[in-house]
Amino acid sequence: MRQNLSLILLLLYFVTACNQGSQTEETQSIQEMLEREMQNQQRSLNGDGSDYLVEIITDETEVQQLIRRIAKSQKNRENNVDFFDDPESLGARYKAGDKSVVPEIVALMKGRMNDEKSNLFWQLTPWFEDEAFTITEPELIEAVFDNITRGGEQEEKAIQLAGELKLKGYVTRFEKRLLSGESADPGRLFYWLSQDGTSSKALTYAETELQSGSVSEEMLVDYVQGLGGYCEYGSKTNKNKALDLCYYIYNQDLVPAAKFNELRDSYASDNPAWDLLLALFKYGDTRSVLAAENYYRRDILQTDALSCLIRLEGKKHADKVYHLLESETKYEDGLIHVPAMYALTNDKALIETSIVNFEKFLADSYEDYVLEKLLNALDETDPANTLKNLDAYLTSTAIQEDAEQLHRIMHTTATEVATYLLDHHLIDQPVDAVKLAEINDQQGTEAIWSVLELSGIQLWFDAETDLVPADYDVLLEDFFKISHGKLDGAVAGMEAESDDDFETITYEVMVVFNNKGYVIKPEDIGDWYDVQHVEKLLNTILEDNGIAERYVPVISGDQTAQYIFGDEEAATAFIEEFRLGY
């Protein structure tokens, strides 16, 4: 799955970070951009109601012309790193296992071509699909560290890359750079050191800086997040020191009161109050009780505050759990605390109240995720009797049946999913037994998507590409790969023309398969795919060639698109059976 950083999430982040009490021109502009992106998402995934046109070309001469255009477009893609995420870039080749590029990467890292170097750092950044990626060559590791030592505009990027990949020796090198006092980005150095948690010298450095009163608000965010990291990963001594520093920051009002007040309306990752309270509530001792009581009353990080109070003071806070469960607007928050309180009290009334009030508040309308929250709470509380308790306290037969089906799905194993796919002819061969065994401890949605990925009939991608023009040809190639050979031999290309300012893009997307050509002209939606038009193209190709299978969409409810390849009726039944989608 390709997952790119979403512009819409960035915009949402900036909007929520703004003071909601004042609508500045900048804030209004950002809100307008957000609304436009939401409209683009709607157009991308749901279309505009058009009956999308797919041109089918059968004339042999025209098909050959189309093949030449596709070949030319593919060549252009290879050479055009400005428009496309070039698979031949140094970083991409290295990630793919091509070690012959190491000397060239090292030379670029050691050079002074900052634009090219910035692109290289970006290319080497690990994304979600790069979980196993790391850098092992000593000369390349040293080149990354060299950019940290030299400082300058690449230091921040080098720190981030070395920290994310936990390059060999990074703790020693980061500590030395931090203690030198020469780094322009000490906060990030401290943060990444906290993810290891062994450097006591870094904690002492942070203590000195915090007590000096010279730490900027921006840098304070990194220090607070780093202290949270030490609380989680550090030795007992380092945990205690980090926690003491958290209390120092809180008691000395190093984080302004206004930052805590902002948490009532919004959460932003650049607000140090958020991370400070989370550290105090999750790892704190009895010194956190007064703060937890205060912020619980003020409905600021209320769930975390109550978890802290229950952890530190136990069943005396049972009334707060009941208060949340009895509130229609806070009911879901109450469910979170039922297992911990039940473990302390063995109070059966918690189970009854959870079930009865679900029906009371949500009988007419609820989403699967809310019912799943209830079932999870019951499973954690009294796992042997989840269904019996539902039977005892629910009056609605419809909700009970729904809950029983969802509960079964939540506990479905990977083997059961794989068996279903084979029995219902969505796959022709059993899923690889060795790989299946590796994930058979998974259950529910996690198991379902893992098995679909192993089976090779599922594609899940971000509909926002972060590319202009959008790379339709690459997307189509990904679709071809999940066709189980039915579209082997299909080739795709695209042509994109724009005005000088790239304000409007005109697309022509081409596929040749089985001596026929297929052409669409997707709508220009900025950096979003016209997903509905692509779906129409693919299923037209299948239908036109007498192939029974279809690409069947799974409605995600977010900006991603999901498809399953197979018999349309069987795939639809699978989606319904396992309640996939939004």
Image: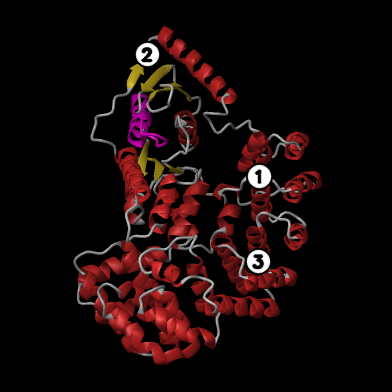
Vertical order, 430 against 491 (above or below) = below
**Residue density around tag 3, few if under 14, some if 14–19, many if 20 or more, within 10 Å:** many
Give the Cα separation between the discs numbered 2 and 3. 63 Å
**Residue density around tag 1, few if under 14, some if 14–19, many if 20 or more, within 10 Å:** few
**Residue ID at (43%, 22%):** 500
Q: Is residue 536 magenta?
A: yes
Contact check, label 2 and label 3, Cβ < 8 Å: no
Left/right placement of residue 16 relative to residue 67 reads left
Of tags 2 and 3, the one toward the viewer is 3
- In the current view of this chain or complex, which residue is farthest to the top? 61
Residue stretch rendered in magenta on the structure: 523-547
Q: Is residue 429 magenta?
A: no
Does residue 554 show up? no
Give the Cα separation between the discs numbered 1 and 3. 23 Å
The image position of residue 509, as x and y in percent, is 41, 24
What amino acid type is highlighted by mark number 3? Ser
- Write down the residue under mark 2: 58
Give the Cα separation between the discs numbered 1 and 2. 55 Å
Depth check, front residue: 147 or 79: 147
Of tags 1 and 2, the one toward the viewer is 1
What amino acid type is highlighted by mark number 2? Thr
**Residue ID at (64%, 48%):** 157
The image position of residue 57, as x and y in percent, is 36, 15
Vertical order, 338 against 526 (above or below) = below
As drawn, the label of residue 153 is 1
- Write down the residue under mark 3: 194
